[in-house]
């Protein structure tokens, strides 16, 4: 990655930390995160907006990092998979993914987690989400390993941890633990 | 045996789960090195063309361009099967498909490399392209590989077992049908990526997203002309394989040569389009099937003629050609069987091994034939399959040895779970249930290149810290092989999973394992790990027994403790037990290795070793579909799958394999198609147009684990990663028939084909 003579500094808040970083006009947010900031958790699966592996949250909204020009994010707040866990431990949806075996190869997992986090944080909290609602929320993230079964189990379980009960039809024989 | 039964068969997740969910797992493209260059590959725009001239001078004069390499730089051919080394890193004399590599450029960054690719001038003389396999088989005037005999055949197999013609002559029911299985691809979400570096001592290191570090190691040595001991291959976590990363590819060899030429690290990352071009996916296969039954529904003979569209290179094709016939001989008793299997070259991306390698296409044909027979004879299709079950501890008609085979339990499970007995035949028109079953290998008895060395090995070290390290050449591509090894070691040594570190797939650090293909790792590396762990456990027990003045057989290792079986109140932390053992025996370690049995497991005819395996898994599927007769849309409502994996060492991971296999089969049945246009260009070289199922498309998958332990498997374990795909596809096709009474014998099952079949059905009803 050469810095490029037409690179301009932009300011971002990435996972709560303010950073100033160079970006050329053609550089995507994904490239800036991965190659300039070393945040390689977000993945490049297709580089054309089809797979969702690069999903990050910009000002709370899920965006495809590979289709988002970095310079247009100047001043924005960006959350990536690296910002989900804290010193105290994993985010509850990360923990649910581990518990349910929701990651196989793990390549789609970071993007999948960001879509799940967005869903869990913005959904109606009063009732448990249905399997269909979770499937719809994650439908922009392709997974080739799992058939999505354990991913949906994990997100439903993570939602239940907020105090709502889990829904019937969970694919996991043990359900929420 | 000591051990922790709660670990073996417990519902634990992956040992690298936290790494995966925090983004800490570093895949090949997440690695970068100081002074690293980026390279791109120039690819042929023609399906078949002679290379007249390549001029790299303009590219080389661009600022930031460091090197250009072409076919002249890498004249040694390679290929995964030693008898069909028909590939070059870059086309030497001609390009054989749209996308065939012609040259590569290393530059300071990807953008510069891309500009340099555009500046390389290649002059082609366009040759006639063969895109249809029937035509390619017929034509002798156009030779895709000049050195092969006329007709563009990669391989032809003709085998017959039993008196097929006599059986057909007498059979009361003969079904003769044509089937077509289309091309599909793996579409792992991680694109192939390789990074090469040469250190100060001249040691070449290649990090690659590969399923087969060992075969890559061999190819690098052969093509680059370097001794294998001067090359190190490291496989980082791989973002999905499914067979699509099971052989050496141009980017690995090209990045290595560019690193040697420039003295700088070089990375190549495929674009998504290049992943589709690299392909090695499911062979499009045309099958003419003749199957004879007696009045009670017993199979009496089967005769199949298969034509496999191989694409431009052999890949695993020699083996695929056999698999397309060899594995149809079970899980049913087949008294007489004949097949002709031909694989032809065409000017398209090369086909190879995709999950279920070679056996998925003929399984579709066979299971639909069985469904047709059930309808003809008025027998329940599950019952028909039970009647035909081959049994356990037996042999197939083509002489493959069969050990355990839990097919009947699988059929029972899906029958029960789907409410088959209560619901089938009582659903409204437009809704249907279909069944299918299959069996698959747990590794092959013979390695790809003939040798007597172990097919898998493990080195185990334990020390005073209480930690155990497992060194294994195994490739974790998401299936969980490292977790499998840790689970076995944890069970044998009584250590917690968290206290085991698996170091895998690094040719400098780990013993050879042949790779993640043919569902071999649990059976083979699992054995090696079990043996090594038992040896270390024995030392630990002896050392503790001496201290306790007890007998070693009375010392159990479990739950992080050494326990006196005669007085369970007497325990010792394992770390202390390791200290005693290290004091008594010196550095604690053991090796385990595994090779397959070779006696009495297959016939001695040519090709008879192919399909031979230490143990077969068994699978049954029921699919429920809704067919919209107005639109032709087929919706799979639910798939029930029961899979006999012998013993589920990690049930959560086994379920994941079952669910992922069902999902992949579903996508193949209804949505995916890897196809080329009239010029040989891919129609859908991206993840939008090549439609892999999303979370909204995918049906609910209900998995059941069946355990019919096999004496050849560690703890009885057999494969789980591929078997559960096979019969998912015919189960869906059979459910479509149950719903609306039409057969779609040409995959994928699209709305257009369903509507056309329904129209034909109406016409026929009208005529009657």
Image (cartoon, helix red, strand yellow):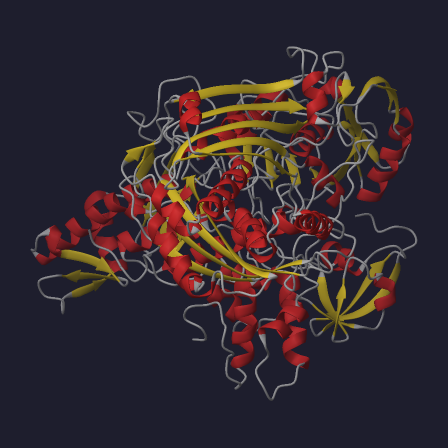
* Front-most of residues B432 and B447: B432
Q: Is residue B127 left or right of residue B211?
A: right
Which quadrant of the structure image shows residue B317? Answer: top right
Please name the residue shown 54% across and 17% down the image. Answer: B83
Image spot of residue A32 (x, y percent)? 78, 58
Which quadrant of the structure image shows residue B713? Answer: top left
Is residue B445 visible in the rendered structure shown here?
yes
Image spot of residue B5 (x, y percent)? 27, 59
Please name the residue shown 60% across and 33% down the image. Answer: B352
Q: Is residue B510 left or right of residue B69?
A: left
Q: Is residue B138 left or right of residue B445?
A: right
As drawn, the residue found furthest toward the bottom would be A126
Residue B213 in the image: above or below residue B703: above
Please name the residue shown 73% across and 19% down the image. Answer: B73
Image spot of residue A150 (x, y percent)? 52, 64
Is residue A87 visible in the rendered structure shown here?
no
Residue B687 in the image: above or below residue B531: below
* Front-most of residues B629 and B472: B629
Image spot of residue B348 (x, y percent)? 73, 30
């Amino acid at each position: 990655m050469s810095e490029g003579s037409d690179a301009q500094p932009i300011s971002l808040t990435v996972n709560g930390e303010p950073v100033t970083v160079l970006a050329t006009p053609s550089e995507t947010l994904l490239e800036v995160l991965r190659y300039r900031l070393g945040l390689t958790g977000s993945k490049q699966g297709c580089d054309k907006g089809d797979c969702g592996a690069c999903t990050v949250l910009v000002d709370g909204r899920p965006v495809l990092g590979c289709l988002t020009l970095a310079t247009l994010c100047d001043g924005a707040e960006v959350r990536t998979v690296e910002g989900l866990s804290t010193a105290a431990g994993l985010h509850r949806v990360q923990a649910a993914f581990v518990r349910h075996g929701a990651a196989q190869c793990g390549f789609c997992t970071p993007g999948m987690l960001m879509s799940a986090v967005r869903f869990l944080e913005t959904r109606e909290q009063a009732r448990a989400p249905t399997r269909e609602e979770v499937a719809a929320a994650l439908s922009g993230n392709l997974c080739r390993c799992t058939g999505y079964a354990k991913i949906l189990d994990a997100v439903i379980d993570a939602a239940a941890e907020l105090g709502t009960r889990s829904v019937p039809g969970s694919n996991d024989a043990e359900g929420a633990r | 045996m000591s051990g922790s039964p709660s670990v073996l068969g417990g519902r634990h997740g992956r040992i690298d789960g936290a790494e995966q969910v925090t983004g800490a797992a570093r895949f090949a493209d997440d690695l970068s090195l100081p002074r690293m260059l980026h390279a791109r590959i120039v690819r042929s725009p023609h399906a078949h063309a002679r290379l007249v001239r390549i001029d790299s001078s303009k590219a080389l004069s661009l600022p930031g361009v460091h090197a250009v390499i072409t076919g002249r730089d890498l004249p040694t051919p390679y290929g995964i099967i030693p008898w069909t080394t028909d590939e070059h890193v870059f086309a030497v004399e001609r390009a054989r498909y749209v996308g065939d590599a012609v040259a590569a450029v290393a530059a300071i960054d990807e953008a510069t490399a891309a500009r340099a690719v555009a500046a390389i001038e290649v002059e082609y003389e366009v040759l006639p392209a063969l895109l249809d396999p029937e035509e390619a088989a017929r034509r002798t005037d156009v030779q895709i590989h000049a050195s092969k005999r006329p007709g563009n055949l990669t391989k032809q197999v003709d085998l017959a077992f039993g008196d097929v013609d006599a059986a057909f002559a007498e059979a009361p029911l003969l079904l003769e049908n044509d089937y077509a299985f289309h091309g599909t691809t793996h579409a792992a979400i991680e694109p192939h990526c390789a990074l090469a570096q040469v250190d100060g001592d001249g040691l070449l290191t290649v990090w690659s997203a590969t399923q087969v570090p060992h075969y890559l190691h061999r190819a690098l040595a052969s093509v680059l002309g370097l001794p294998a001991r001067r090359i190190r291959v490291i496989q980082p976590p791989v973002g999905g394989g499914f067979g699509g990363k099971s052989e050496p590819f141009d980017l690995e060899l090209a990045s290595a040569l560019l690193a040697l030429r420039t003295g700088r690290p070089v990375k190549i990352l495929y674009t998504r389009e290049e992943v589709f071009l690299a392909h090695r996916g499911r062979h499009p296969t045309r099958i003419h099937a003749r199957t004879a039954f007696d009045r009670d529904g017993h199979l009496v003979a089967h005769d199949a003629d298969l034509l496999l569209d191989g694409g431009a290179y052999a890949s695993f094709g020699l083996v695929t050609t056999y698999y397309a016939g060899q594995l149809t001989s079970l899980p049913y008793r087949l008294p007489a069987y004949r097949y002709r299997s031909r694989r032809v070259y065409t000017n398209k991306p090369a086909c190879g091994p995709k999950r279920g390698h070679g056996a998925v296409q003929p399984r579709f044909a066979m299971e639909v034939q069985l469904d047709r027979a059930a309808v003809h004879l008025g027998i329940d299709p599950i019952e028909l399959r039970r009647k035909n079950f081959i049994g356990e501890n037996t042999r197939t008609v083509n002489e493959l040895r069969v050990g355990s085979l839990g097919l009947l339990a699988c059929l029972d499970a899906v029958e029960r779970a789907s409410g088959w007995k209560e619901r089938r035949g009582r659903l409204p028109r437009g809704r249907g249930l279909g069944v299918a079953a299959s069996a698959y290998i747990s590794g092959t008895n013979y390695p790809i290149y003939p040798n007597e060395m172990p097919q898998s090995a493990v080195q185990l070290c334990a020390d005073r810290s209480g930690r155990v390290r497992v060194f294994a050449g195994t490739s974790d591509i998401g299936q969980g092989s490292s977790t499998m090894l840790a689970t076995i070691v944890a069970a044998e040594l009584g250590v917690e999973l968290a206290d085991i570190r698996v170091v895998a797939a690094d040719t400098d650090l780990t013993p050879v394992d042949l790779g993640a293909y043919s569902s071999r790792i649990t059976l083979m590396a699992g054995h090696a790990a079990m043996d090594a762990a038992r040896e270390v456990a024995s030392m630990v027990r002896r050392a503790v027994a001496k201290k306790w003045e007890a007998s070693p057989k009375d010392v159990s290792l479990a739950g992080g403790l050494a326990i006196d079986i005669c007085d369970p109140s007497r325990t010792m932390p394992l770390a202390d037990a390791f200290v005693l053992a290290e004091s008594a025996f010196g550095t604690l370690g053991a090796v385990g290795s595994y090779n397959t049995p070779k006696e009495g497991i297959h016939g001695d005819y040519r090709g008879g070793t192919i399909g031979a395996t230490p143990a077969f898994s068994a699978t049954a599927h029921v699919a429920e579909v809704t067919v919209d007769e107005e639109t032709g849309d087929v919706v799979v409502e639910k798939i029930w799958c029961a899979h006999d994996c012998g013993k589920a060492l990690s049930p959560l991971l086994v379920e994941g394999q079952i669910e992922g296999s069902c999902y992949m089969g579903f996508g193949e049945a209804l949505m995916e198609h890897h196809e080329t246009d009239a010029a040989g260009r891919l129609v859908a070289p991206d993840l939008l147009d090549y439609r892999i199922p999303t979370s909204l498309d995918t049906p609910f998958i209900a998995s059941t684990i069946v355990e019919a332990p096999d004496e050849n498997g560690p703890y009885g374990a057999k494969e789980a990663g591929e078997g559960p795909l096979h019969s998912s596809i015919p189960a869906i096709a059979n459910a479509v028939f149950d719903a609306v009474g039409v057969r779609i014998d040409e995959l994928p099952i699209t709305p257009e084909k369903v509507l056309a079949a329904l129209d034909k059905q109406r016409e026929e009803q009208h005529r009657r």
